[in-house]
Amino acid sequence: MAVFAASTTVMRGFGKLLSESLHPKFVKRFSTEIPVSQDVEPAHLPHLTDTFGRQHTYLRISLTERCNLRCKYCMPADGVQLTPKNNLLTTKEILQLAELFVRQGVNKVRLTGGEPTVHRDIVHIVESLHKLKKLDTIAITTNGLMLTRQLVELQKAGVNLLNISLDTLKPERFEQITRRKGWQRVIAGIDLAVQLGYTPKVNVVVMRGLNDDEILDFVQFTADRPIDVRFIEYMPFTGNKWDGNKMVPFREMLERIQTVYPGFHALANKPNDTSKAYKVPGHKGQIGFITSMSNHFCGTCNRIRLMADGSLKVCLFGNTEISLRDALRNNCSEDDLLNMIGAAVRRKKRQHAGRYLTDETSKLILSGQENSVNFYNKAYVQNLHPYTLYGGFLLNKTLENKKLIRQMSTGLTHVDNEGKASMVNVGKKAISERTAEATATIQVGKEVAKLIADNNIKKGDVLTVAQLAGVLAAKRTWELVPLCHNITLAHVDVRARLDQSASAVVLTSSVTCVNQTGVEMEALTAVTVAALTVYDMCKAVSRDMVISDIRLLSKTGGTRGDYYSKLVKNPNS
């Protein structure tokens, strides 16, 4: 079972598996219940191309978690708990990873934060990036407070694009929104950028009742300045107490502007642009709308994000990350590092971390009730409770007698007439879609459950590693169970849910194939290995863990018909 463990010793022998899934050692979890799905992927995809054919040429690097503002829509008034310095990427590691991404096809890097200008090596980082031959664009997103002191030096170092956050043109309101002073310095920074030849983008998060009365003022702000004011729909983030009533949709903003400026018209957009460009005739600048809530732009997304702690996010709304920092510090080879990155990119969902929004869920989001919608779980999974063990497999020594074996083998498909093991011949069976779902429970005890909930198990993120181990196990069932057929799986989905009240981890799997035989064993193997992985990762804390109730929940397809356990409602009944 070492192949499924999250220990550093696994690195040497895990290179082949990295091309199919993420290395568990380097995965980070942000919730106690995360889906991990893996579809069949086209062969020979480049490391930065996902399964939807999107080429990822744009890397955003968060240089630091620190910020010198406390914007209401971004973080709580008392700030956020910062990652210990030793757990952040060093300047050398940032540049090492950036060079790797550029060699793989990234041609644009944006430096963000926190606030990137508070990083002491900001100029050195820009200079080093500028030396990368295939890197065309170095951009910075900043709150503008430090620009009057740093911009000239940053421009000489190689910064050629500039985004400045400014949510109000009123000094007193600036202090209200950011909980800090400095409005005049930001305006001076914008004007300096224009003088230096930039066409800065000014990002405005529009919030109803707070600054939406300034939309027309910002449009006027573009009259004599060659700037691009971009109105951003207010989005939900942890800690910002998001309220759907505060969000002003793009269409509403557009109508307000066109009422005053009838000639306000759309401009052409590039394929990967996140902003819808518009212009008032005669104005030096232009207006853009970033419609991440009302009209997402995920279909052409070419962005990936490297966090300050070395985590790689392939989607802003994603809830699973891999730690490139840990890979570097464990002397991971470049090939394995690239395989990790490639696996992460190929697991990127089509849009917003896989949240395919229906009209109903969109309304819930816009009304501020997104958290009431569970996008991932079926009802029976939500209601699963640790089960009681029902029986088990009994070994009867008398079965060593071949005669008795032949008597017991009547109707069994994996034993021939001589009592010998035999694989079933499925060559004459019809090809059809077949699915299977299974579950298992591991009682871990209160102490372990608390550590899992807090993500404080020393070996790493227990739930995510268990899920990944289950995915790998399902795909290799034919190697683990001797009489199973080697079949191509169309889809594997493994989920781990911590039931802290019961001090248990509940594991479920769903496996699909289009073949001549089913996938019950794959589903059962997935939850079994996932449970063993939980045990392996937590055994240093306690060995008083019990794996129980490994059972099939349902199976569909095949000549024997569908099956549903008592725990699952038969949709055909």
Image (spheres, helix red, strand yellow):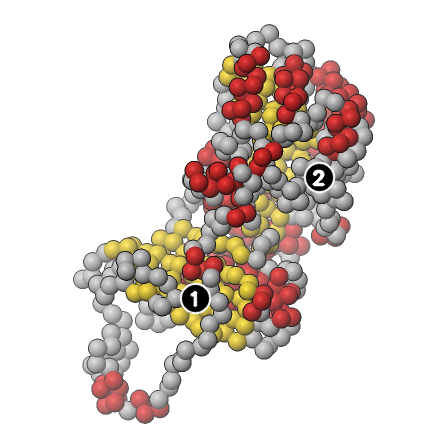
Q: Position of residue 502 (x, y in %)?
A: 56, 69
**Image quadrant where residue 239 sits:** top right
* Comparing labels 1 and 2, the label whose residue is closer to the camera: 1
Badge 1 element: strand
Badge 2 element: loop
- Placement of 509 over or under 361, stated as above or below: below
- Residue at 28% x, 91% y: name it: 401
Distance from disc 1 to disc 2, alpha carbons, whole Å, reads 41 Å
Kind of residue at badge 1: Thr
Mark 1 or mark 2, which has the lower sequence index?
2
- Residue at 59% x, 46% y: name it: 312
Q: Is residue 459 visible?
A: no
Nearest the camera: 480 or 313?
313
Q: Position of residue 166 (x, y in %)?
A: 70, 27
- Residue at 51% x, 14% y: name it: 265
- Is residue 440 shown left or right of residue 422? right
Q: Is residue 525 visible?
A: yes
Residue, disc 1? 439
Nearest the camera: 18 or 453?
453
- Residue at 62% x, 10% y: name it: 283
- Placement of 27 over or under 154, stated as above or below: below
Residue farthest top in this picture: 282
- Placement of 81 over or under 395, stated as above or below: above
Q: Position of residue 49 (x, y in %)?
A: 47, 40
Nearest the camera: 28 or 13?
28
- Placement of 167 over or under 240, stated as above or below: above
Kind of residue at badge 2: Gly
For the C terminus, which image quadrant?
Answer: bottom left
Residue, disc 2? 114
| Mark 2 neighbour class, 10 Å CA radius: few under 14, some 14 to 19, many 20 or more | many
**Image quadrant where residue 542 sits:** bottom right
Q: Position of residue 270 (x, y in %)?
A: 50, 24
